[in-house]
Image: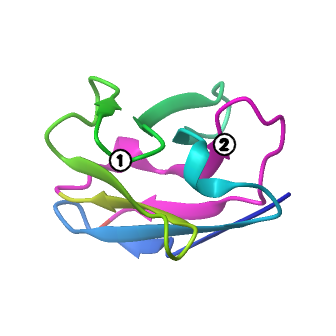
Amino acid sequence: VQLVESGGGLAQPGGSLRLSCAASGFAFSVYHMTWHRQAPGKERELVAAITSGGGSTNYADSVKGRFTISRDNAKNTVYLQMNSLKPEDTAVYYCKASGIGYWGQGTQVTVSS
């Protein structure tokens, strides 16, 4: 199993970033996928989830209306579009396949002016 997150970086408040997570080593298209984040000194939290076929999504209240999770099963990739970023979105972001106990290395997102 391999999950490689990318797309993080520095963004200004109100800005946007698009995270990608390239998956390999398992049957990506049959797994629900999730994005999580962990800020310094805080526990890792679930941010967004998408079903295996992409037909249903769920979001943490803190990101609802600003973040969008999507996936491309042909490319074995899940995305997180983040708009209207806030300083409190600063964290390391991880993707995960539901039911598989493996985490990638994550990608750092920093929101600061």
Residue 38 in the figure: left or right of residue 15: right
Image quadrant holding the C terminus, namely bottom left
- Residue at image location 18% in from the left, 47% down from the top: 66
Secondary structure state at the residue bearing disc 2:
strand
Image quadrant holding the N terminus, namely bottom right
Q: Observer-nearest residue: 70 or 82?
A: 70
| Vertical placement of residue 5 versus 52, above or below | below
**Where does label 2 land, which residue?**
97
- Residue at image location 63% in from the left, 50% down from the top: 94
The spot of residue 99 in percent (x, y) is 73, 29
Amino acid identity at mark 1? Gly
Q: Quadrant of residue 63?
A: top left
Colour style of the rendered protein structure: rainbow
**Where does label 1 land, which residue?**
54
Secondary structure state at the residue bearing disc 1:
loop
| Vertical placement of residue 51 versus 22, above or below | above
Q: Quadrant of residue 72?
A: bottom left
User: The magenta stretch spans which residues?
Assistant: 84-112
Residue 100 in the figure: left or right of residue 44: right
Amino acid identity at mark 2? Ala
Please give the label number shown on residue 40.
Answer: none
Q: How many marks?
A: 2
The spot of residue 101 in percent (x, y) is 83, 35
Residue 112 in the figure: left or right of residue 85: right
- Residue at image location 28% in from the left, 41% down from the top: 55
Q: Is residue 7 magenta?
A: no
- The mark closer to the camera, 1 or 2, is 1
Q: Using the rendered image of the protein, determine whether residue 92 is visible from the camera's viewpoint.
A: no
- Residue at image location 45% in from the left, 67% down from the top: 19
